[in-house]
Image: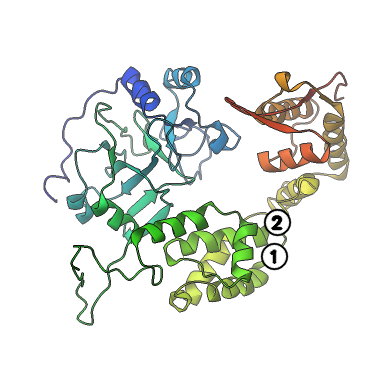
Amino acid sequence: MINGWGKVGPMPTIDRTAAKDFIISNDLYLLPLQSIKGGICTCRKQDCCSPGKHPLLPYSWKRIATNDETRINGWLAKNDINYGIATGRKSKTNGLYLFVIDVDRPDHEILTKLPKTTFHYRTGSGGWHFWFWSQYAVPNSASKIAPQVDIRGVGGYVVIPPSRHISGSSYVADFKADIQIADNSILDIIFFKAKKDTSGKISRKEQNNNSVQWDVLGKIDSKEEIFDQIQSWSRANVSEIRTWLLEGKKIPAGIRNVLLHRLLSSDRAKGFDKEQLLISAREYRNSCEKGKSVSNRELVTLVNQVAKYPTYNSSYEKVNEHYFEVMKRAGKPIDIAEQETIKTLDSQFFTSLAMTEKSKGIPITILIADRDRLVGNIITRFSKYPQALFAAKLKSLGFERYRTAKGNYWNCCVGQAEVS
């Protein structure tokens, strides 16, 4: 136990109105998650790998997450779901980015370095979530800064009270606390790794300006440059990353595993098998700062993870073929007649789409739901379009996307033709 952190003291009862006010006032993005009922996840899968923590709705959670007060009120009124908050997004309220330090062990040594004054709470498993604002977009990481300590930043989310945990406990917090801006001591924990001397002790050389000399991400003159570099690589798409690698740039050590995973996932989507992925992984390692520190075992682990993903999942033209392949591997093959029916229904749906005025545009989530409903009225098992591939399909048909203050809309809708 460290300074009483291991003790579970009395926690306040969750006031959902206070939770809503906290979310709205900080311009946070709420998303609904599966919950726990009868000791299992409400998704009802006995082998669920993330019970009570994965998104409730079958669409991209990054688009579902919202700061719309009406939708937040509706979700918080439900007692049978869990809740998450998207991290890494820039708040319109203060212009800062949210990140969360997730400490899995209740008496972890790192707790002595984290301020109790910032918004934090006990998780259902007994660990801790500490929330901070930062002027920098902080990347996700797992056990990078310390064992059993994860960071949730850009592209991540955290479970919040009053969610239920698989252990039977609940997340509980006092929403009256403020989210503090991370000072240098916290940012140093997040971004930097102290250099060890030959005796194995941590050596932190204090300079005249009372700053610390760090050995991380190559030789860069200032922390600001390191932060900018991390943000630049974490925000880049895979095509940009590949271009930089061709130009001879090195993948920063601070987000190395994340970028290797993205590059390999891109290769897998193109149809690469395990052997081809491993060849790619070794090439990418040569393009990493301190690449020699990446062991073959680490590469094999990454490849094994990525090899579980379906191939050809980056082409809207192969959504149905990919679905048939997955079902065959799962031992539930779709017979030829059903395959032809699915293809026909899918084609009829997209043919039924009609152009509409921008003022009457439709969110892509609604269009996807319309497609699933119309096709599902005829056949029970059929393919599902990820949002990105559905959007690519719409573009190929000549439809346009446009932006409003409320989000992205498409100038199309289901026309008069019926899918039959």
Let me know if residue 308 appears in the view: no
Q: Residues within 10 Å of mark 2 (few under 14, many from 20)?
A: many
89 up-or-down from 223: above or below: above
Task: Say left or right for 81 vs 275.
Answer: left
Q: Residues within 10 Å of mark 1 (few under 14, many from 20)?
A: some
Task: Tell me the residue at 22%/48% (across/down).
Answer: 114
Counting residues from the N terminus, which is met first, the one under dot 2 or under dot 1? 1
Q: Residue at x 32, y 62 (%)?
A: 192
Rendered-image quadrant of the C terminus: top right
Q: At which x and y percent is residue 380?
A: 74, 31
Q: Residue at x 46, y 46 (%)?
A: 154
> In the rendered image, which quarter is residue 78 located in?
top left
Classify 369 as above or below 128.
above
Q: Position of residue 76 (x, y in %)?
A: 42, 21
Identified at 63% across, 68% down, the residue is 277
The amino acid beneath tag 1 is Phe
SS for tag 2? loop
Question: What residue is disc 1 on?
Answer: 272
Residue most extreme to the bottom: 198
Q: Is residue 325 left or right of residue 41?
A: right
Q: Circle 1 — which element? A: loop
Q: Is residue 42 left or right of residue 177?
A: right
Residue beneath disc 2: 311
The image shows residue 166 at horizontal and vertical percentages of: 38, 38
Amino acid type at circle 2 is Thr
